[in-house]
Image (spheres, grey):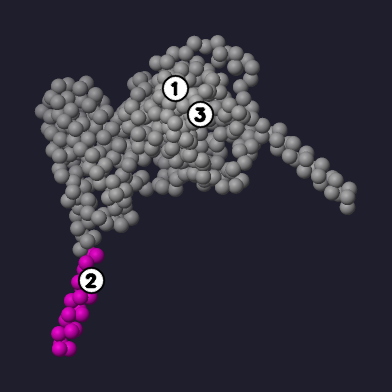
Amino acid sequence: MKSLILPAVTAATLGLSFQPALADEAGEAAMAARHGEMSLMAHALGILGGMAKGQVEYEKIKAEAAAETLYVVSSIDQHLLWPEGSEAGALDGSRAKAEIWTNMDDFTAKWNSLHTATEAMKTAAGESQQAIGAAMGAVGGACSACHKAYRTPAS
Amino acid sequence: MERILRVLVVLALVGAAAFWYLTRPIGLDGESVAAIDALTPDVAHGETMFWAGGCASCHAAPGATGDDMLVLSGGDSLASPFGTFYAPNISQDPTHGIGDWSVIDLANALTHGIGPDGTHFYPAFPYTSYVHLERQDIVDLNAFLKTLPADSTPSKAHDVPFPFTIRRGIGLWDRLFLTPDWVMTGDLSPELERGRYLVEGAGHCGECHTPRNAIGGLDRNRWLAGAANPSGEGTVPGLTPDKLDWSAQDIAYYLETGFTPDFDSAGGHMANVVSNMAHLPPEDRAAIAAYIKALPASGS
């Protein structure tokens, strides 16, 4: 009997001590995936923005590929990427405000409005440098609307 | 003993009279009133001033977007070391808003920080920046505000502890910190002058980007050098060349779209500023950028 208790207690103790670590790992993996989404979009926006600013010459193929990236990334279902406990303060490197989890509907609506803006960008990207410039405002507005409500300031 | 008491009473009365005199509301003089009354408003330009001044950022309901930005029912909160201030209703409602204000009332509020009854406003309302506004721009802004809807939401009382509840005291503060003098001086190009007007005046950038002293006055020696966020959450970045290395084009583009040179995007209160600045003509955003690029290093 005694020989059974010890391993059981040990297992329970280990289990307890592993539990938070596992949650952290899952949270960190989700956060890394979120940051990956943002990096992909920043890269694509850099290509479109460079053209919009006139720093880079307009190239239809590149512009369309960049706009497609924005469109596809913003179509990713977000619900796997925001596990509870992955907010700023709980997780190093996270700037996600806790309000995300209390306003998930609004948060999702803001993500979807980004997708709408990228649809317009897809059209613009096939047209001209000027059209891209005009479409950047709505994309930027969608980014800012969510960052304003749900991202903590950079420290 | 009675004599000492009598002297003390007299001294107290003299002190009170001096306080009353020094803190009295000072409004526009007769000449300014006549000059303003003689101007003809341009409503369309008034809308540009509305966005340049960032009125909606604080006076629209928190979280408002699109046309709701034009419903100035108030309610946004500004936390500070002196308490929390709530932006009042400045819609056209005659009771809860400013529907019964004259253009002179608006001018006194914007440039002297006082209400129609002589009440001092708290400097959470950036009249120390709006003091630079041109008379014509105030007249135009007034005409535009008159076109906006009335809303009967009552203004929320400020959450401010004693002694800051004594508004007369702000009269003393104004004597120290309310000045029509520009920070950037010298022989400026027309573009820089326009940029200075938008940054130091209407856009009131210094209110957040310049550090404040112990009694809440802006430290003009560290103009736009970055500051603690009065809400306690993070910091407001510096715009001086030792703090910000963006090109003029980067700055103008950020004000138009919210995108940084790395294509991160504006968040926090700055997201509001960008959505205001996006309404300005491109030359104005370029003028702001030129002004920022002309700032000296802060040395701190």
| Left-right relation of A131 to B88 | left
Q: Mainly helix, strand or loop, the magenta region?
A: helix
| Left-right relation of B52 to B28 | left
> Magenta region: which residues?
A1-21
Residue in front for this viewpoint, B128 or B113 = B113
Is B137 situated above or below B155? above
Where residue B95 is drawn, which disc sits there? 3
Q: Residue at x 39, y 29 (%)?
A: B71
- Look at label 2 and name its amino acid: Leu
Residue A85 placement: quadrant: bottom left
Residue in front for this viewpoint, A20 or A106 = A106
Question: Could you tell me which quadrant the N terminus of chain A lies in?
Answer: bottom left
A117 drawn magenta:
no
Q: Secondary structure at mark 3?
A: loop
Task: Give the residue at mark 1.
Answer: B145
Task: Tell me, yes or no, whether the two marked residues, 2 and 3, touch with CB atoms within 8 Å.
Answer: no
Q: Is residue B175 visible?
A: yes
- Give the x, y percent position of residue B265: 29, 37
- Give the x, y percent position of residue A65: 12, 32
Residue in front for this viewpoint, A120 or B24 = B24
Q: Secondary structure at mark 2?
A: helix
Q: Secondary structure at mark 1?
A: helix
Whether labels 3 and 1 belong to a single chain: the reply is yes
- Give the x, y percent position of residue B3: 89, 48
**Crowd class of label 2 (few under 14; some 14 to 19; many from 20; radius 10 Å):** few
